[in-house]
Image (spheres, grey):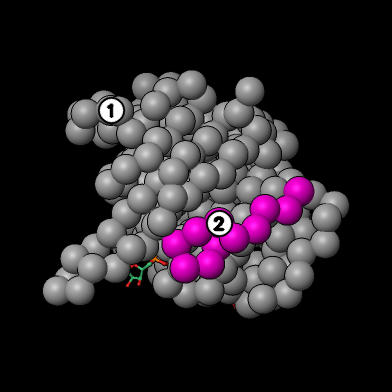
Amino acid sequence: IMFLSTSNLTKSYNTGIITHVLKGVGLEMKRGEIGVILGPSGSGKSTLMNIIGGVDRADGGTVEVDGNRITDLNNSQLVEYRRESVGFIFQFYNLVPNLTVAENIEVVSNISKKPLKTDEMLSAVGLYDKKNRFPRELSGGEQQRVSIARAIVKNPKLLLCDEPTGALDLETSRGVLSLLQKVNEQFGTTILMITHNSAIAGMAQVVFRMRSGEVAEVAHNSEIIPAE
Ligand code: ADP
Ligand code: ADP
């Protein structure tokens, strides 16, 4: 039984010309897996992830997460799904600049039903000693670790990461990726991650390669991923 499955997802934008961004996307992941989405710019990766995370709606097709059909939810149910079940991590951290590290995490835990403890999250990401600092006082890698703590404090079933290391140097990226692996192991969180870096695919159990609005290729753990 699959934890996450999408079937025949379609999405178009009309900006004068109609762009078919998703042309029938299907993918499946088991609970607790790490999945990676590779593919060139404009192939629909972010659109797909936004639909899975309930921040955008598909034109057609279905998304199921942990037995719930997300594509059937009304707007308020979708807000609830997003708030309780999904953690988001972005390339540019999206921390609130005038809140401390701890307060940034509490923005999320304060609206969650069963939040984990802020101090435990800070320890997990190695930033307990910086809890009263402001984002601008931290390095890029540290800010991304805060955003990981903020994403997991609600104990989400699913963690969606859009280019989480896109703004970081190689060394710092390694630290962020191994932290995500630790989250996956420690909390059993299923992780789906967009990246341009095919080296990152090595940490995934499943790799989806997108090409112009379709999943062109699926590879499971030990299979070799050809370069872009
Ligand atoms: P990727 O993440 O693979 O770079 P995206 O999902 O961001 O791809 O975008 C896929 C295509 O959809 C691009 O051509 C992009 O310009 C278009 N697109 C994305 N969002 C919108 C939007 N809100 N309005 C119009 N076009 C959009
Ligand atoms: P990295 O190379 O890992 O991105 P930096 O060189 O940016 O790290 O920062 C190294 C250390 O200095 C980090 O622990 C960071 O918290 C601290 N630091 C960076 N900028 C500031 C600042 N403006 N105020 C206080 N501490 C800072």
In terms of secondary structure, where does tag 2 sit?
A: strand
Three-letter residue code for mark 1:
Leu
Label 2 belongs to which residue?
Answer: 215
- Assign the C terminus to one quadrant of the image: bottom right
- Assign the N terminus to one quadrant of the image: top right
Q: Which mark is residue 73?
A: 1
Q: Is mark 1 within 8 Å of ligand 1?
A: no
Three-letter residue code for mark 2:
Val
- For disc 1, the neighbor class at 10 Å (few under 14, some 14 to 19, many from 20) is some
**Ligand 1 location (quadrant):** bottom left
> Camera-side residue: 171 or 160?
160
Look at the image and say whether residue 218 sits in the magenta stretch.
yes
> Which of the 4 image quadrants contains residue 115?
top left
Q: Nearer the viewer, mark 2 or mark 1?
A: 2
Q: Is residue 15 above or below residue 123?
A: below
Q: Position of residue 98 (x, y in %)?
A: 29, 60
Visible residue check, residue 213: yes
| Horizontal side of residue 160 vs 78, given as left or right | right
> Camera-side residue: 119 or 213?
213
Q: Position of residue 155 (x, y in %)?
A: 51, 31
Query: Who's the residue at 57% across and 29% down the image?
Result: 3
Q: Which mark is residue 185?
A: none
Which callout, 2 or 1, points at the residue further toward the start of the chain? 1
| Horizontal side of residue 149 vs 100, given as left or right | right
Q: Is residue 21 above or below residue 48?
A: below
Q: Position of residue 76 (x, y in %)?
A: 20, 29
Look at the image and say whether residue 213 sits in the magenta stretch.
yes
Q: CA gap, disc 2 to disc 1?
A: 25 Å
- Specify the segment rendered in magenta: 210-220
In terms of secondary structure, where does tag 1 sit?
A: loop
> Camera-side residue: 129 or 69?
69
Q: Position of residue 180 (x, y in %)?
A: 64, 49
